[in-house]
Amino acid sequence: MHAPTPLYLLSLLPFAHAAETTLGAFVFHRHGDRTTKAWPPTHLTDLGYSEVYSAGSYFRSKYITNETTAIPGIAENFVNLAQLSVEAPVDTVLQNSAQGFTQALYPPVGSQLNTQTLANG
């Protein structure tokens, strides 16, 4: 019996890739660009917020909205807290980075945004 040729094995790669299913994702993301620690207080810069927002958008497009690589059963438009856990230490830069990332991961939806009536009218 002959061993499979490398060309034959390479032809099977599309089938192996098609069988992959993403069951979940773990993201360790530190923070975006920040002001220096030499002159406190340290803050996330506009560039830093843009960086973490872009990262969140990438993960949304890869694992939530993509038809082929999305995690099966994950909520697409609204956060399901049973499916998502976000943690950040008590630090302004890290918490703002986590907020920017999650705002891109699950952006605001719906026609009733900014239309709430307050109790005092």
Image: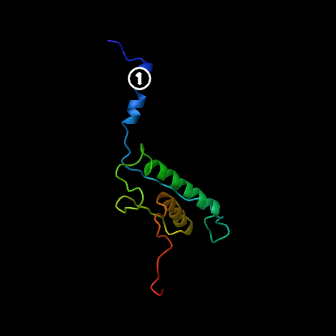
**Farthest top residue in view:** 1
Looking at the rendered structure, the kind of residue marked 1 is: Leu
Quarter that holds the N terminus: top left
Indicate left or right for 79 with 51 as reference.
left
Render colour scheme? rainbow
Residue at 52% over, 51% down: 58
Residue at 45% over, 47% down: 66
Quadrant assignment, res 31: bottom right
**Farthest bottom residue in view:** 120
Q: Residue 103 versus residue 9: which sits nearer the camera?
A: 103
Residue 68 % position (x, y): 42, 42
Residue 26 % position (x, y): 42, 52
Using the image, determine if residue 89 lies above or below residue 21.
below
Indicate left or right for 112 with 49 as reference.
left
Residue 120 % position (x, y): 47, 87
Residue 91 % position (x, y): 53, 68
**Farthest left residue in view:** 1
- Quickly name the residue at label 1: 9
Helix, strand or loop under label 1: helix
Q: Residue 119 versus residue 58: which sits nearer the camera?
A: 119
Q: Residues within 10 Å of mark 1 (few under 14, many from 20)?
A: few
